[in-house]
Image (cartoon, rainbow, N blue to C red):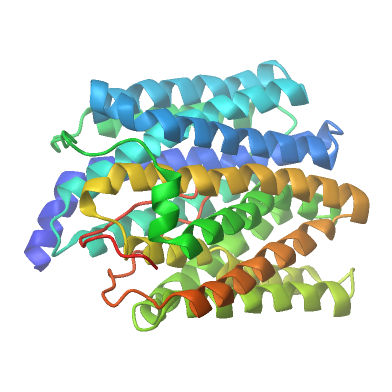
Amino acid sequence: MRSNLMGTLATLAALLLGFGLLQLGNNLQGTLLAVRGGLEAFSPTQVGLIGSGFSIGLVLGSLTAGTLIQSVGHIRTFAALAALASASALLHVMLVHPVAWIGFRMVTGLCFAGLLMSVESWLNASATPAVRGQILGIYSMTGLIAAVGGQMLLPLADPGGFMLFACVSLIISIALVPVALSKSQAPAEVGARTRANLRHLYRQSPFGLVAAFLCGISTGAFYALGPLYAQQAGFDDQGIALFMACAILGAFATTWPLGFLSDRMDRRRLVIVVALASALLLAAMMLFLPQGMAPGWVFFLVFAFGGVVLPTYGIVVAHVNDSVHPTEFIAASGGLLIVQGSGMALGPLLGGAMMEAMGRNGLPWLVVLAQGLVAVWGAYRISRRAAPVEKEQFVNMTVSPVGTTLIEATQEAKPS
C-alpha cells in the first residue's frame, strides 16, 4: 500500500503544488484586503461586504464550474480561471474603492470555485480507494501549510503599497506552471451529475446542510474581519499575521484528533460538543477576560478558537459523505460549496454590522451565536433521525477562506 501511495503522490505532486500556491496567494490576499481596507478608513461593514463578495462569487462559480470542467477539461479550466484570478488581484490596487473591491472579490471567488472543484475532482478520481483518504489528508495539510504561509507573508512589505498585491498576482500565476506541465492524466467526468440539487441534498442530510451554512457564517466572518479585529486591538502587521496564523495552527493541531473521534461515534454528537465548546470559550473570553491582556494570551486564545471552530466544517462534510452516492460527487461538492459559500457571504455582513454596533467584540459574539445554533440544530436532528449505520472514513478538510468541499462517497444514499 505504501508503494501505491508513493506512486499516486508522484503523479499528483504537480497538482498539489499548484493547489498549495493558489492557497498561499488567496490567504495572503484575504488578510491584505482587510488590513488595507482599515488603512483606507473603510468601515467594518464595507470590509465585511468585500469579504462577502468572494463568497458570493464562490456560490455563483459553484453553479457553473461543473459544466465548464466537462466542456473544456480540468487543465484548461484551471489555466483560464487562474489567469483571471491573477489579473483580479492587481485590479484591487489599481482602483482602491470599496464598491470596486466587492466586484473584484466576486470575480476572484468565482474563479476559485472552479479552480477548487477542478483540483478536488481530479484528486478524487486519480486516487484509488486504498489510498484516497491518505491522499486527501495530504491535500488538506498542503492547504493548511499554505494558509499559514500566506499570513506570514503580510509583514514582508507595506500593506499600503503595491508590492503585496503584485506578490498575490505572481503567486497565483506561478500556480499555473506545475498544473499545465503535469504528466498526470486529467479525469473524464462523463455521465456524472454536475447540477447541484439542494433539496435532494437536504433530504439526504438535513443536519449537514444547515450546519454547513452556519459554519460558513463563522469562518467567513473570521477570515474577512479577523484581521480588522486584530488591527483594532492594536496589533501591527506582524501581530495581525501571527493572530491569523495562530487560528489556522489551532485547526492544524485538532483536526486529526477530532476526525479520529468522528469515525468512532455519531458525528452529529461530536459537532454539538465542539460547537458548544467554541461558543462557551468565546463567551467566557468576552465576559471575563480583560480587554488589554498580553499579546501572548491573545495568541493562545485565538489558537484555541481555531482548534474548536475551524475544523467543525470538516466533520460536517464527513457526515454528509456518509449519505452521498458516488455518481453525485460533483453535484454534492457544488451543493456544499453553495451552502457554505452562502454562509460565508452572510457572515462578514453580519459581523461588520455587529462590529459597528458593539465594537470589535461584535465579531466573536456572532461566532458564539452561529455555533450555538449548530448545537441546537444538531440536538434537534438527533431526536428526529438516527445516524447512518455505515460511515465513510473522515477526510480532513482544508481550513481556508474557500472552505473546500471534497466528497468521498462510496455507498448508497441514506437519510441522516
* 92 relative to 354 in the view: left or right: left
Depicted 279 relative to depicted 405: above or below? below
- State which quarter of the image contains the N terminus: bottom left
* 270 relative to 322 in the view: left or right: right
Can you tell which quarter of the image residue 57 is in? Answer: top right
- State which quarter of the image contains the C terminus: bottom left
Closest to the observer: 204 or 86?
A: 204
Q: What percent of the width, then of the height, locates residue 108?
A: 53, 29
Closest to the observer: 62 or 1?
A: 62
Can you tell which quarter of the image residue 168 is in? Answer: top right
Q: What percent of the width, then of the height, locates residue 235?
A: 80, 55
Q: Residue at 28% x, 60% y: name it.
A: 413
* 97 relative to 319 in the view: left or right: right
Closest to the observer: 311 or 226?
A: 311
| Residue located farthest toward the front when viewing the structure as drawn | 384
Q: Residue at 37% x, 30% y: name it.
A: 65
Q: What percent of the width, then of the height, locates residue 400?
A: 52, 51
Can you tell which quarter of the image residue 345 is in? Answer: top right
Q: What percent of the width, then of the height, locates residue 52?
A: 66, 38
Depicted 303 relative to depicted 43: above or below? below
Task: Tell me, yes or no, if residue 102 can be seen here.
Answer: yes
Q: Residue at 74% x, 23% y: name it.
A: 99
